[in-house]
Image (cartoon, grey):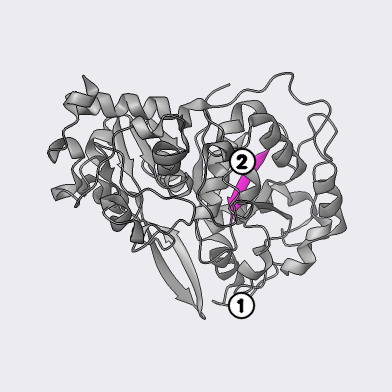
């Protein structure tokens, strides 16, 4: 099966797709309870319409959509926390993450078999068309990109027909389909109404018993710690090595003070040597460099920067032109969320051919990997034009010899 390339879909494009999929019984916009669902457990049953997934955070998904007060009919909610294996911040009672909380080789994601069970229970079956969005106005489009990246990893097993992220999220959809800004249209339904008995049964049914005989994942989108270490060695001696790009905020990248580490479970400040700075926003949990925000009746709508603007931004950071020519890029952040969005932008918006997400991120590299204490680290101000540490005098050659 050919490698799946994710796409960025606009609200009007999604509306056209949904209307065409439901052409037999009128325009899309029926209540969620009547939206066709996949019967999990039946082999090769295709959904009548694309599977819509709202990437949420457990315990706050309803509150996250309160500003909009709606969801797209037919949506199934998935907590992004549920697709990960650690660290369990609540279990650690706010303490630092330890190696015992983590597993290695695929960063923070669940093992493939467990992740497959979760997404199948949400109605994502073989040959599905999937559109991911989020109602969480403060995290848009971070949560959606995180879930999409995980689905892309499983794409060979799921044999997905298409995988897209909805630009503007739920707020953009409701505004675009209402005709009048800020007015909910018939193409939105209340979030409470979306929690139908159909959905409850779907999510509790578990995995299909007639799934694939073996699991196949797309490791082309994933960088392991071993690959990152190799990239550091390569970049220390040659500009042709993979481009490491840090997608955290400036003070995280500079790493000069533990007082400015916003993760309660990370106790090390710094960055991976040779990394370029890919920008993000003013703080760990507040982005903004990669998108623009407009406000409609008090509700923020966040859309990704157009291709030309995003390409210019990363070109100014020192790595964009080489990446566009095909040089491999490895994005990382703290725990793989921001770098998943960077991966999506690079692949879906810019069309870069060789891009990976180091899902373990700074957490795994500096703290939870069994060999973390042996890995070199860098700190200090951002170099001119965002250049990597190999141009900033970091003495790596002795370590890399």
| Residue at 74% in and 36% down | 117
Q: Can you tell which quarter of the image residue 129 is in?
A: top right
Measured along the vertical axis of the image, is residue 250 above or below residue 21?
Answer: below
Question: Secondary structure beneath disc 2?
Answer: loop
Query: Foreground mark, 2 or 1?
Result: 2
| Residue at 51% in and 66% down | 138
The location of residue 54, given as percent across then percent down, is: 64, 55
| Residue at 30% in and 48% down | 278
- Span shown in magenta: 128-133
Measured along the vertical axis of the image, is residue 109 above or below residue 286?
Answer: above
Residue 130: in magenta span: yes
**Residue at the far bottom in the pictured view:** 297
What residue is pinned by disc 1? 183
Any part of residue 239 in sight: no
| Relative depth, front residue between 317 and 159 | 317
- State yes or no: discs 2 and 1 in contact (Cβ < 8 Å): no
30 relative to 378 in the view: left or right: right
What residue is pinned by disc 2? 85
Q: Residues within 10 Å of mark 1 (few under 14, many from 20)?
A: some
How far is disc 2 from disc 1 in space, using C-alphas? 39 Å
The N terminus - image quarter: top right
Magenta highlight: main SS: strand
């Amino acid at each position: 099966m050919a490698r799946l390339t994710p796409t960025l879909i606009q609200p009007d494009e999604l509306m056209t797709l949904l209307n065409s999929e439901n052409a037999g019984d009128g325009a899309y916009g029926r209540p969620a309870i009547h939206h066709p669902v996949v019967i999990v457990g039946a082999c090769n049953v295709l959904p009548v319409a694309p599977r819509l997934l709202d990437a949420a955070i457990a315990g706050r998904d309803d509150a996250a959509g309160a500003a909009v007060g709606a969801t797209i009919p037919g949506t199934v909610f998935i907590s992004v926390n549920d697709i990960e294996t650690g660290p369990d911040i609540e279990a650690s009672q706010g303490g630092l993450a330890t190696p015992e909380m983590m597993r290695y080789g695929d960063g923070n994601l669940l093992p493939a078999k467990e992740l497959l069970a979760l997404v199948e229970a949400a109605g994502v079956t073989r040959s599905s068309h999937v559109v991911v969005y989020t109602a969480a106005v403060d995290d848009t489009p971070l949560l959606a990109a995180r879930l999409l990246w995980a689905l892309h990893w499983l794409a060979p097993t799921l044999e997905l027909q298409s995988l897209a992220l909805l630009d503007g999220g739920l707020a953009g959809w409701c505004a675009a389909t209402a005709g009048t800004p800020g007015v909910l249209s018939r193409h939105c339904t209340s979030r409470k109404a979306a929690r139908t008995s159909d959905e409850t049964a779907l999510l509790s049914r578990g995995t299909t018993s007639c799934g694939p005989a073996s699991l196949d994942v797309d490791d082309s989108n994933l960088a392991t710690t071993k690959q990152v270490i190799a990239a550091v060695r390569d970049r220390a001696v040659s500009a042709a090595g993979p481009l490491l790009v840090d997608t955290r905020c400036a003070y995280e990248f500079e790493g000069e003070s533990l007082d400015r580490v916003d993760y309660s479970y990370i106790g090390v400040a710094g960055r991976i040597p040779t990394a370029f700075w890919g920008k993000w926003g003013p703080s760990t949990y507040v982005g903004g460099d990669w998108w623009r925000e407009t406000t409609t009746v008090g509700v923020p709508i966040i859309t990704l920067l157009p291709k030309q603007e995003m390409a210019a931004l990363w070109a100014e950071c020192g790595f964009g032109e080489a990446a566009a020519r095909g040089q491999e890029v490895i994005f990382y952040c703290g725990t793989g969320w921001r770098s998943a969005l960077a991966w999506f932008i690079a692949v879906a918006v810019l069309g870069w051919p060789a891009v990976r997400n180091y899902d373990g991120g700074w957490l795994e590299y500096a703290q939870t990997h069994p060999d973390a204490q042996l890995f070199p680290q860098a700190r200090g101000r951002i170099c001119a034009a965002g250049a990597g540490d190999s141009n900033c005098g970091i003495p790596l050659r002795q370590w890399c010899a």
